[in-house]
C-alpha cells in the first residue's frame, strides 16, 4: 500500500492518513474536509452554500476549527467551521460499506464532531464507514429575524448539506450512499428526529437513531415568538436599538463572532434564566418563511404522519434528570428554591407564566405525584431526578413513539440505557452519586466512541467492555440491515408495536422489558391532557 492515502471527491483531491486503532488493526482517516463555504460576512445567518473546488491535494490529515462556543466564560472555535471527517476501515476500498453519520450533542450551543469525544475506532472496526461533522451553534446557527434575509435554523440546514455531501462523495471512501444511518445524542438526537421531519432531508438517509432526544424536546425547541424575542434582546445587548429585522441582520453581521457567542445566554429573559435548563438559541418554528426547515410544528407533523418512514431506534438513559446536577454542588439552598418554586421545572410546551395561579396548579399536581408527602430536598433527589427525566426527555420521546406507531409501519426499536458508568470514565461529574441509581444523560455515547479525553480502560473482561460490545454490535448491525431483532450472540430486540410496548434495557446483562415507566407515563398523559399542550 502506498504511504500516501489520496481520495478524490467532487471538489478535488484529499490526502488522508493511516491510523492505528484502539480497537486493534487500523483505519483510514480524512479530517477537516470543507463541506460548505465558510459562513462569513454576508453568508453569516444565511443557509450554507456548497464548498467550492480547490487546486492540488488538500491536506485532510488533521482536524479543523470547531464552531464558536463558550467554554469557561471564553469563546473558543472559529466561524469558518463547516468541516466533516470520514473514517473508513479499508484502503483502497474493495466494496461499498454501510455509512453512519454522527450528529453531535451539546444543547445547540457547544460541541463538535472531533475525536476528543467521538473517536471512530470501535464503530469502524465493525466494517462501517463513519462520518462526523460540525454545524453552526448558538446565535450563529439559530438566530431568528423574520422579515430579513437572515434565515432561521441554519444549524439544521448545515446538517442537510453535510448529508448531501455524503450522498455525493461517500463512495470515494468505500461508503454506500444507499445505506446511510444518521444517529445522534441529546441535541444531536433532536437534530436526527428533526431531519426525519424536514422535506429538505428526504432521501438523504435510510435509517435513524435518536439517543436521548426528539424534535419537540421542550428545552431544545423554541416557539416562533420566543425565538424572535431572544434575537431582538441579543441585538439590543450588542448596541442595535433598531426594530427593523433587516437593519438588525446587517448590524449583527458586523459584530465579531466572539461577541455574539459571549452575549447569547443573556438573550434569555429573566424568567427563562430561572428555569431548570435553558438554551438561548435552538431550533424554532418558521411561520412566515417561504422556505421553512419545518413546514409546521414538529408535533403537528408527527400527528399528520409527515415524517421519514425509515427504521428507527430511540431511547433514553435510566436517570436522564441527573444532568441537573452535573458539574455543580447540590447546595441545600438550591433544593430549597426548587421546593419553594417547583414551577421552575415546568416544560416550555405548557407555556405558563411563572407565579400565576395556573402555573402553581400545574406544579402542585407534579409535586403530589412525584413527591407525595415528602419535601423537595436532598432526601428526595431520586424523585426529583425521575420528574426531571420524564418532563425533559422521557415523555416527549414516549409521545413521539406513539405517533410513529400510529402513522408508520417501519420498525421502531426502543431502549433504556441503564449501565452506571465508573466515576473515572464520567465526562461530566455527577454529584448525585451514589444516592441516585441509574445512568445519567450523556453516559451512553461513551460506549460507542473512543474518547481521547479519558484513558482507554475498556479491559476485555470488564463490565464496560461488555456494554460497549452490546452497543456497538446493535448499532452497526442496524446500520447494515435496518433490523436488530436478531443480532448474533445478543438478546433478540423486538420492535415496539401498537399492542406491545417493549424495550431493551442495555446494561451488562441485557434484558427485554415491557412497558416504559408505565405509571409515570400514564400520569403525564392525564396531566398534559388536563392542562393542554401548546401546539
Image (cartoon, rainbow, N blue to C red):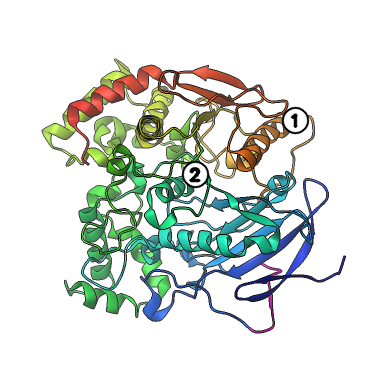
Rendering quarter of residue 306: top left
Against 415, is 257 above or below? below
Please name the residue that numbered disc 2 is placed on.
327
- The residues tagged by marks 2 and 1 sit, at their Cα atoms, a distance apart of 27 Å
Magenta-drawn segment? 55-62
Residue 112 percent location from the top left of the image: 54, 58
Mark drawn on residue 462: 1
Q: Residues within 10 Å of mark 2 (few under 14, many from 20)?
A: few
Looking at the rendered structure, the secondary structure element under dot 1 is: loop
- Overall secondary structure of the magenta section: loop
Measuring from the top left, give residue 161's x and y in whole percent.
Answer: 48, 63
Look at the image and tell me in which quarter the C terminus lies. top left
| Side of 479 relative to 350 (left or right) | right
297 to the left or right of 11:
left
Which residue is more in the foreground, 185 or 100?
A: 100
- How far across and down, in percent of the image, does residue 274 sit? 28, 45
Query: How would you rate the neighbour count of disc 1 (Cα within 10 Å): few for under 14, some for 14-19, many for 20 or more?
Result: few
Evaluate whether residue 381 shows in this view.
yes
Q: Residue at x 68, y 68 (%)?
A: 62
Which residue is at 18% across, 74% downward?
241
- First in sequence: mark 2 or mark 1? 2
Amino acid at each position: 500500500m502506498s504511504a500516501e492515502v489520496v481520495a478524490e471527491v467532487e471538489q478535488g483531491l484529499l490526502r488522508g492518513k493511516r491510523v492505528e486503532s484502539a480497537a486493534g488493526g487500523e483505519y483510514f482517516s480524512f479530517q477537516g474536509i470543507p463541506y460548505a463555504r465558510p459562513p462569513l460576512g454576508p453568508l453569516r445567518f444565511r443557509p450554507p452554500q456548497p464548498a467550492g473546488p480547490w487546486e492540488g491535494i488538500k491536506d485532510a490529515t488533521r482536524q479543523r476549527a470547531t464552531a464558536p462556543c463558550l467554554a469557561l466564560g471564553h469563546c473558543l472555535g472559529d466561524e469558518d467551521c463547516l468541516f466533516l471527517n470520514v473514517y473508513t476501515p479499508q484502503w483502497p476500498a474493495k466494496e461499498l460499506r454501510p455509512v453512519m453519520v454522527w450528529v453531535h450533542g451539546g444543547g445547540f450551543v457547544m460541541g463538535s464532531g472531533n475525536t476528543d469525544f467521538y473517536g471512530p475506532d470501535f464503530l469502524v472496526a465493525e466494517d462501517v464507514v463513519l462520518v462526523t461533522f460540525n454545524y453552526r451553534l448558538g446565535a450563529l446557527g439559530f438566530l431568528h429575524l423574520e422579515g430579513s434575509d437572515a434565515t432561521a435554523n441554519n444549524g439544521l440546514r448545515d446538517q442537510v448539506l453535510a448529508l448531501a455531501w455524503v450522498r455525493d462523495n461517500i463512495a470515494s471512501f468505500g461508503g454506500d450512499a444507499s445505506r446511510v444511518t444518521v444517529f445522534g445524542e441529546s441535541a444531536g438526537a433532536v437534530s436526527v428526529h428533526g431531519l426525519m421531519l424536514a422535506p429538505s432531508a428526504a432521501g438523504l438517509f435510510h435509517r435513524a437513531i435518536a439517543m436521548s432526544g426528539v424534535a419537540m424536546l421542550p428545552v431544545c425547541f423554541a416557539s416562533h415568538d420566543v425565538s424572535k424575542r431572544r434575537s431582538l434582546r441579543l441585538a439590543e445587548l450588542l448596541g442595535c436599538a433598531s426594530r427593523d429585522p433587516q437593519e438588525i441582520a446587517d448590524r449583527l453581521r458586523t459584530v465579531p463572532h466572539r461577541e455574539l457567542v459571549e452575549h447569547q445566554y443573556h438573550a434569555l429573559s429573566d424568567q427563562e434564566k430561572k428555569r431548570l435548563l435553558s438554551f438561548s438559541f435552538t431550533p424554532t418554528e418558521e411561520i412566515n418563511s417561504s422556505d421553512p426547515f419545518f413546514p409546521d410544528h414538529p408535533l403537528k407533523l408527527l400527528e399528520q404522519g409527515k415524517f421519514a418512514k425509515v427504521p428507527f431506534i430511540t431511547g433514553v438513559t435510566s436517570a436522564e434528570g441527573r444532568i441537573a446536577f452535573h458539574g455543580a454542588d447540590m447546595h441545600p439552598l438550591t433544593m430549597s428554591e426548587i421546593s419553594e418554586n417547583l414551577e421552575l421545572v415546568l416544560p416550555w410546551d405548557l407555556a405558563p407564566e411563572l407565579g400565576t395561579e395556573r402555573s402553581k396548579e400545574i406544579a402542585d399536581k407534579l409535586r403530589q405525584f412525584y413527591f407525595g408527602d415528602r419535601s423537595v430536598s436532598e432526601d428526595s433527589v431520586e424523585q426529583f431526578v425521575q420528574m426531571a427525566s420524564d418532563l425533559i426527555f422521557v415523555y416527549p420521546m414516549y409521545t413521539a413513539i406513539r405517533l410513529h406507531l400510529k402513522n408508520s409501519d417501519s420498525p421502531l426499536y426502543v431502549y433504556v440505557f441503564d449501565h452506571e458508568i465508573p466515576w473515572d470514565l464520567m465526562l461530566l461529574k455527577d454529584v448525585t452519586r451514589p444516592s441516585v441509581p441509574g445512568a445519567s444523560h450523556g453516559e451512553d455515547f461513551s460506549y460507542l466512541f473512543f474518547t481521547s479525553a479519558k484513558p482507554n480502560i475498556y479491559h476485555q473482561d470488564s463490565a464496560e467492555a461488555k456494554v460497549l460490545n452490546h452497543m456497538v454490535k446493535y448499532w452497526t448491525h442496524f446500520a447494515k440491515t435496518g433490523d436488530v431483532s436478531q443480532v448474533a450472540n445478543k438478546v433478540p430486540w423486538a420492535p415496539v408495536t401498537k399492542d406491545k410496548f417493549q424495550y431493551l434495557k442495555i446494561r451488562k446483562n441485557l434484558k427485554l422489558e415491557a412497558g416504559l415507566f408505565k405509571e409515570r407515563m400514564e400520569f403525564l398523559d392525564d396531566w398534559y391532557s388536563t392542562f393542554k399542550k401548546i401546539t
